[in-house]
Image (cartoon, rainbow, N blue to C red):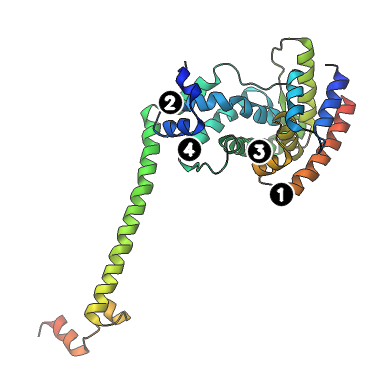
Amino acid sequence: MKNSDLKELLIRSLDKESDPEKASGKIEEAGVSYRFKEGFRDRVLDRIYSAGDTVVREIEFVRSLNSVFYRIALTGVAAIVLLLISIFIVQGSLSFDSFLGLGNGNDESILCLLTGN
Amino acid sequence: MIKESYKQKSENELLKASLDGDKQAFGEIVTRYQNMVARTVKSMLGDSVFSEDIGQDVFIKLFYSLSEFRGEAKLSTYIQKIAVNLTLNEIKRRKRFFSTFSQKGNNEMYEFEVADYETEEKKEASELVGKALGSLDPKFRIIVAMRMLQGYSTKETAEILDLPLGTVLSRLSRAQEQMKNILRKL
C-alpha cells in the first residue's frame, strides 16, 4: 500500500461512521502489526511461577485470610448479640450500668464487695 | 508446549483451571490475548523492551486479580482495562521522570524501534504509524489505538476507558484533526 493510501486509510478509520473492525483489519493488512517477541507467554509464566510455589501459596494465604476474616467477624457479631440478649435478660435493660453489671446494685453493696466486709 | 486440549477450552474453563493453579490454562489465556495487549501497549508506549515489561505486568496483574473477576464484562475487556491503566500509569511515570531529570519534550517519551519486517513496504507502514502515534497527545493516542488498531466501537472504547460516550466522540474527532495535521507533515 502506498504511503498516501495508508494515510488516507488512517484518517478514514477515525470517522465516526466508519466500521472500526474493518478499518483495523485493513491497517493490519498494510503491515501495521504489534507483537511481543517470541516466547512472551513463557516469560510471563516464568515471572509468575519463578518463585515457584511461594507465589501461589501467597495468593492462597491472602484468599484464606479473607475468608477467615469473614468467619471471625461473623462469629464476633454473633457473640456480641448473644451477650446483649443475656444482659437484657439478666439486668432487664440495656443501660450503661447494666453493661457494667451495676444494674441492680447500690453503693453499699459495691463497697462491701470491694472491702470484703 | 500447550496441550491441544487447552486450545479447545472455553474462557470460563480456563479461568477456573487457572484459579486452581493450572499453569498451562493461564498460559493459554496469555496466548489468546497477548496480541491484543501488544497492540495497546506498543501503540501507546512505542515499540521497545519497556513495552514488553508492561505487557508482562498486565498478565501478572490479571493473574493476581483472577479471583476478583466476576464475569460481568468480557475477559478481553477486563484485560484491556488493565492494559490501558498500566500503560497510562507508565506514561505518567515517564512524564514525571522527564520533567524532573531531563529537558526532553513529550515526544521523546515514545520510543520507536522498527523490528524486522517481511517487506520494505510493511516496515515503512509501521514507521509511519509509529511516528504519527508518537506525535499524538496520549489522551488522543489511546482513543486512536482503541479505534484504529483494536477495532473497537465508540461504545466499547468508552466502556474500556471508563469515559462517557460524548467524551470519546469529541476526543475522536479532535484526534482525527490532530492525525490529519501530523500525517500531512510526514
Q: Mark 1: which secondary structure?
A: loop
Report crowding for label 2: few under 14, some 14 to 19, many 20 or more residues within 10 A (C-alpha): some
| Residue receiving disc 4 | B66
Q: Out of B104 and B148, give the one closest to the viewer.
A: B148
| Residue receiving disc 3 | B88
Whether labels 4 and 2 share one chain: yes
Query: Which image quadrant for residue A35?
Result: top right
Q: Residue at x 30, y 63 (%)?
A: A78
| Residue receiving disc 1 | B164
2 or 3: mark nearer the eye: 2
- Residue type, label 2: Lys
Label 3 to label 4: alpha-carbon separation? 22 Å
Label 2 to label 3: alpha-carbon separation? 29 Å
Q: Position of residue B8 (x, y in %)?
A: 49, 23
- The tag earlier along the polypeptide, 1 or 2, is 2
- Residue type, label 1: Pro
Q: Chain of mark 1?
A: B
- Residue type, label 4: Leu
User: In this image, A55 relative to A16: left or right?
Assistant: left
Q: Can see residue B87?
A: yes
- The tag earlier along the polypeptide, 4 or 2, is 2
Q: Out of A110 and A32, give the one closest to the viewer.
A: A32
- Image quadrant occupied by the N terminus of chain A: top right
Q: Which mark is residue B23?
A: 2
Query: Which image quadrant for residue A57?
Result: top left
